[in-house]
Image (cartoon, rainbow, N blue to C red):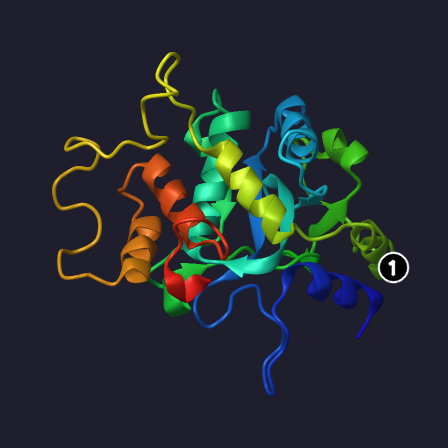
Amino acid sequence: MSPLNTEFHRLFLFPPGPALPGTLLDAQGRTRALVLELIAPVDTAALGALWQGLQTELGMPAPAVAVNGRDALQLWCSLAQPVSLGQARAFLEGLVARYLPDGPARQWRAWPVADAAAPGGVAHVSPIPAEQPGGECWSAFVSPDLAPVFAETPWLDIPPRDEAQAGLLRGLSAISPAAWAEAMAQLAPAAPAGQADTVEPFPVQASATPPGVGPAAEITDPRAFLQAVMCDARVPLALRIEAAKALLPGTPGAPAADR
């Protein structure tokens, strides 16, 4: 295995099986790679604030920065332990709400994403680096200080060198379970001023979730109920984040099966 493949596997992939290469998704649709794309022309000041905030405010290791070879700059976050689609989306959407509140939805994409046409109903971003259709552009990891150079042209016009790509990944580390739990708590919306002592973080009201949205009434297993809440994009984000936090191993209130 080349140095680049070694580093990419270490950070983002599941171990290969007997007849399968390493993958970004396992058989349950879980992932260790969370990817946020900002579509060109990229507001690199906002991208820099997000990259820095992940470290200084959320206590996470630096994410990798990449050009997708077509139309966007990417941040790649590595996880020590895999998370479900619902947990991944809650985290990524929380980042957008915190660091990109004024950006229109068309200016960003997040991966993984629910996709009925994909195996298992979950799709992920293409691995990097890779040659793009047409053979004139490449996706690649880039140094964070060079991100502004690619704000309007997020691609390389020559193949990146494997050793240089490996070098960019070699100093990165995965987000620990403890750092993940703390970040999820910080990304949860704060209670209104003056109500912190009297209101639960995410009060469930009759109007909080529209009729017909959320787990079916026949779901009685606590873990299955929480997973259904996490994976339902129609459920308010605050409730999905709470469900994700409750499913984290060792979290107070988590189902007994997770402990």
Residue that carries the numbered disc 1 in the rendered image: 163
Q: Residue furthest top?
A: 194
* Residue 175 image position (x, y, % from top left): 65, 50
User: What element does badge 1 sit on?
Assistant: helix
How many neighbours does mark 1 have within 10 angstroms: few (below 14), some (14-19), or many (20 or more)? few
In the picture shown, does residue 218 fall above or below 102?
below
Q: Residue at x 79, y 56 (%)?
A: 159
Image point (77%, 44%), residue name: 142
Is residue 107 among the parts visible in the rendering?
no
Q: Is residue 61 visible?
A: yes
Q: Quadrant of residue 53?
A: top right
Q: Position of residue 146 (x, y in %)?
A: 79, 34
Front-most of residues 152 and 259? 259
The amino acid at mark 1 is Glu
Measured as percent of width and height from the top left, residue 69 is found at 65, 48
3 vs 18: above or below: above
Above or below, comparing residue 24 to residue 158 in the picture: below
The quarter in which the N terminus is drawn is bottom right
**Quadrant hosting residue 62:** top right
